[in-house]
Image (cartoon, rainbow, N blue to C red):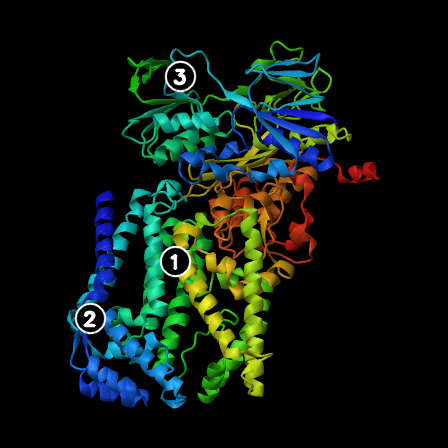
Amino acid sequence: MKAIQNIGLSLFLAGLAIFTILPLIGSYKISSEKLDEIVRNKGIKSELFIEDLQANMVGKEFTNPFTFSSTIISAIENANEKHKANSEWDKVIWDKKHSFSYNIAKDVGSGPVQENKGLFWWLTFGLGIIGSLLFIIPELYRKPIPGIKNNGIWLNPSTNRGWIAWFAFVFLVGFYILLYFYPDYIVNWTYIVDPISESISGNRASQWFLYGFMYCTVMTVMAIRMYIKYRHNKYQMLRTTSVLFFQIVFAFLIPEIMVSFEMPWYDFKNAFPLDYDFFFQWNIKDLINSGGIGIFILVWGILLTIVVVPVMVYFFGKRWYCSWVCGCGGLAETLGDPYRQLSDKSLRSWKVERWLIHGVLVFAVVMTGMTLYAFFTGADTVLGIKTQTIQDIYGFLIGSIFAGVIGTGFYPIFGNRVWCRFGCPLAAYLGIVQRFKSKFRITTNGGQCISCGNCSTYCEQGIDVRAYAQKGQNIVRSSCVGCGICSAVCPRGVLKLENGTDDGDTRHKVPEVILGNDMDLFEMLEENK
Amino acid sequence: MEHIVIIGNGISGVTAARHIRKNSDKRITIISAETEYFFSRTALMYIYMGHMKFEHTQPYENWFWKKNRIELKKGFVKTIKDTSKELVFASGETLKYDKLIIATGSKPNKFGWPGQDLDGVMGMYHKQDLENLEKFAPNNKVCKRAVIVGGGLIGIELAEMLQSRDIPVTFLVREKSFWNGVLPAGESAMINEHIKEHHIDLRLGVNLQEIKADEHGKVKSIVIQETGEEIECSVVGLTAGVSPNVDFLKDSNIEIGRGVKVNRMLKTNVKDVYAIGDCAEQHEAIGNRRPIEAVWYTGRMMGETVAQTICGNPKEYNPGHWFNSAKFLDIEYQTYGWVFGERGRPEYEQHFHWKHPKEHLCITIAFHKETNLFLGINTFGIRMRHHAFDKWLTEKRSVEYVLEHLADANFDPEFYKLHEKDIVAQFNQEHNTNIQLKKRSWKRIFQFS
């Protein structure tokens, strides 16, 4: 079994290595006909840009995406500088530079990857998937008796912030930076999923399709790992199935299929304010312009946020979303499961968490307020601040850096829920409801807690569960996403996730008698008078 | 300001300190020779297994003590001069106290086996034991086999620890069946089976004769008394129970039996000296409890109680209904009230036993043969709600009532398969009754608290 696992690991690493060097294969060449086509399609009016490209690019072969992109980008920058100086605003190219360059590169790339998409899919995704499964599935035979075994997690360099973790950290952060900011460098990655994209929506793959496909693949493979590890725990089995379903069907397939029917791309489970650009001008206009379905989406989006979310949280706690439905939560619960013990449980981190997450919520709400004000009044500034600027700052800082680069990239170092815990504005909103008006709590089982600390260690949200359990207090915390792992790892059966009645008292009260000390509370009250 | 000195920073001592601080402004000092800061002894095993790091076993962050003005002193108390209210440390240093709480816990039992002090022989109780284990059994290359001597909870935990590093384990148990002094026969048999299922070499009904050394004074093998068989091993774990850690009191006026003798107020025979936790021995046992209870939660309860007394609210130690829990490899165990094993079972105690046909799940309910009064329950692989049984025991409910409301007491995670129907059906069949299981009711459940 160990041998099979080692073969699996080798295959996985081989797939990863090929994937990593893929962007460096092949070449990019613009013909003069292609240039004309680009100018026509993009509606470019800058003669400076066209001349620059004609002189420096047409007919030349670029053997890597970096020089290819930098040539295009410097052409844009030089042209824009002069046009702006001359106030020729209609000639300025406003597109995001790397997206602009991505679109061209995708069209003109050639080489083995582009010509053998299927083969390279197998050499990357294929080897990765097969290798991972060969590594994961033998666990069933190595540990035939079900039961959670976190054996060796803190002794393993991949899960104890050792060298493997730092390597994974650099890799993931690098991946997200390329994905969000330099798509033009990773066209080769998008080629290998073109056939899949074309079969679903009819379009070639963008970097976002690549990401979506990869996300689903990683979640599926790691969900299999979850199924094996927690196979005796029905709560974990169902929860894993649920997040997997919502990711694949709602976040991936439905939006792509909608696109193939020329409807807007929309993820029906993605509630505002996590879906922070829902109320952006372009989105609202898009939706209104796409007829009945657009209006339906608009109404659903608003209902989801103001009715469905709080009502569901009232009955089930925020877990119905964070660990049963949400895509970010889905990745955290599958890919992130081996890293959950890394979350910081210190009081200091709790303080930081509360300021940060509520700060992001306020930021999102204020931005949306400004955006809607701008939408209805037609003004593009509020109190002298450009709405667009605020949107750009939010999109960059929160949408890209926090949610993506930090959110996932930091898994191997700070645990798997960095984004959910410190940054997600929707989690903050759900949390406020959960804390003050919900039937959900984690019940602690009287005096059975032995303070071993497994619950706190394995809480991905950094809640010091033990601190409550040893006092016999129910846990009513806004950050709890209800993953249920504290209950699963408890060796004494002390913790249970419950949706009971909510008359205030039953959620918060500590039953003193249960601590075992059979004190007569009434007598004590009398004495202390 | 009155100076309260506590010897021992385990759960008892620390709970006492915390509650004294909660209720007063007295000066508090905790002394320990084992570790600088409080940690949960119960979690030591998880450090070796790699589930946690040592820091995770510390329930309070390091700043907690200073912030709460609890002084921590690292040192080993050699003697107590109770007449001058003074402690003498091994270093020669002394410390004055106004009130003293002895909370020194236990030490592993050794029965004078030849070779019991060799290198590679250890208990599993102190942090130092863990460091020893890490030294002598870091992996299965250094440690080809380990032998554990003595059944019980620490023994099976040590077996699980060694197993987590793929070290073969031979487990010598004196009894004919594992932990059968406590567990009824059916349950004990199930655990035997489970231990073997984990490929642990369980030897029942055997005693250790001697531990043999190699030329470096390190353990080489052990010999079994009954068969004379010699088993090669690199590590021997001694887990034949624990006894109070009170040797340092022999030269004082404080009365000791097996432990420090205390009354219900947890006072010793010497004024202003108290003892709590594993090292305290009640003059008379409370109810069915033993005079010395080396249980985690009773240590905590005594800590709370003594803190009340010291803060001017004198209180008797009154530990409510018995409960406990453990985990045998993958099987969780909980008990509420009293369910006796074969040994020491009162003649009026009747058992109802239900076992799942395939899985390692079972329960035993003890009740009074004549009155049908519910006495206690053991559960294996099914979690039960402490509130429920505590209330039912107080209300002196009948076994029929308990079975009828069993659904209220289930504490398994959501979506788990429920077994109450099968349990009740079997009871009805065996006792010719017609008990109808009631649906779970939140209203009743929350009346518990």
* Foreground of the two, A472 or B374: A472
Q: Quadrant of the N terminus of chain B?
A: top right
Judged left or right of residue A78, residue A299 is right
Residue drawn at x 39%, y 44% is A160
Judged left or right of residue B359, residue B30 is right
What chain letter is assigned to the residue under label 3? B
- Which of label 3 and label 1 is nearer to you? 1
Residue drawn at x 29%, y 14% is B214
Q: Which residue is the site of mark 1?
A: A409
Q: Which residue is the site of mark 3?
A: B207
The number of numbered badges drawn on the structure is 3
Q: Position of residue B84 (x, y in %)?
A: 70, 13
* Foreground of the two, A346 or B446: A346
Tag 2: Cα neighbours inside 10 Å, few (<14), some, or many (≥20)?
Answer: some
Q: Secondary structure at mark 3?
A: loop
Q: Which residue is the site of mark 2?
A: A117
What chain letter is assigned to the residue under label 1? A
Tag 1: Cα neighbours inside 10 Å, few (<14), some, or many (≥20)?
Answer: many
The Cα atoms of the two marked residues, 3 and 1, are separated by 55 Å
What chain letter is assigned to the residue under label 2? A
The Cα atoms of the two marked residues, 3 and 2, are separated by 69 Å
Vertical order, A41 against A475 (above or below): below
- Which of label 3 and label 2 is nearer to you? 2
- Which of label 2 and label 1 is nearer to you? 1
Observer able to see residue A472: yes
